[in-house]
Image (cartoon, rainbow, N blue to C red):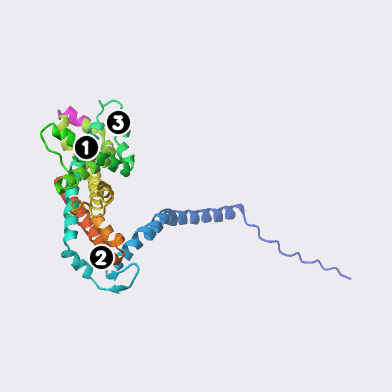
Amino acid sequence: MSLSAATAPPSPTVPSPSDASSRQRRRGYLLNRLDLKYSPYLYIAPFFLIFGAFQLYPMVRTGWMSLHDWDMIGDHSFIGIDNYTRLLSDEYFWNALVNTFGIFALSTIPQLMLALFLANLLNRTFLRAKTFFRMAIFVPNVVSVAAVAIVFGMLFQRDFGLFNWLLSFVGVDQIDWRAQRWSSWTAIATMVNWRWTGYNTLILLAGMQAIPKDLYEAAAIDGASQWRQFWQITLPMLRPTFLFVVILSTIGGMQLFTEPLLFGNGRILGGNQREFQTLAMYMYEKGIDNLSTAGYGAAVAWAIFMIIVLVSLFNFILVRRSAK
């Protein structure tokens, strides 16, 4: 009897250490590629989700409402652009537009000039306790706007206000600040300037500190004065920051609402004769205070949006050309 040798089964192939490390490197490379390609979108996704839910959708919804005779508690009939054509003949809309631009001119232009001066002053090396002054100049922006309105409302009182008392020393009669257009504009612009000048100052100061110091040292060696350095170095290098501040101030000025509302003791009309009713207040009157004209209020909101775009574009072109 012959014994046949059993054939041994083939042994499984054991991957070499070099193959395992190669697959691990390829896997790590693939994960790294995916991380570099898609992770930035994950990081910015929360902003776009919030923007879409709370800004983009309300804008689209408001635009759709502006094309309807929209009653918040009734029917919504489509009327096309009738609400927009109605704006062209609405004297209250044009009155609010004039008031908005008047307060905007009295507040934004002096505010930006003062902010530029203060930022240049705080950027000087000879100034002591600069950190204290930089913090102190931002305090008005931290104060509640309601508290600001109450204080300035007392300052601009007709009978016992501080400003009328000071004007009496130069022979000026008592001014009813809420009864006339120019006086109410001045009072509201003063409130806006006091509250937002420090905010714009810090933005401009940050832009000034980003300017290389070598430019100032070279200019000083060449004999350039401080004033010439400001015009030839600071302003040209500060152009992007200044443009950003101008656009922010334009948006805020065109949407002015809280200060004139509180100055008028909460009256949405902005005075007995609408002396200081702004576009935002008129939009609130038509779109929220009166539920039956919500569609017309939405048209006013979109008109404000288009005005902001046009004014911002005008300021952008003006700043760009003035810097050349």
* Residue 11 falls in image quadrant: bottom right
Residue 291, percent from left and from top: 31, 64
Please give the range of residues in magenta. 217-224
Spatial CA distance of label 1 from label 3 is: 29 Å
Q: Which residue is mark 3?
A: 133
Residue 18, percent from left and from top: 58, 53
Task: Report the mark closest to the observer, 1 or 3.
Answer: 1
Residue 113, percent from left and from top: 19, 40
Name the residue rendered at 46%, 55% in the picture. Answer: 33
Label 3: state its secondary structure. Answer: helix
The numbered dot on residue 161 is 1
Name the residue rendered at 34%, 61% in the picture. Answer: 56
Q: Is residue 200 visible?
A: no
Q: Which residue is mark 2?
A: 296
Mark 3 vs mark 2: which is more N-terminal?
Answer: 3
Task: Report the mark closest to the observer, 2 or 1.
Answer: 1
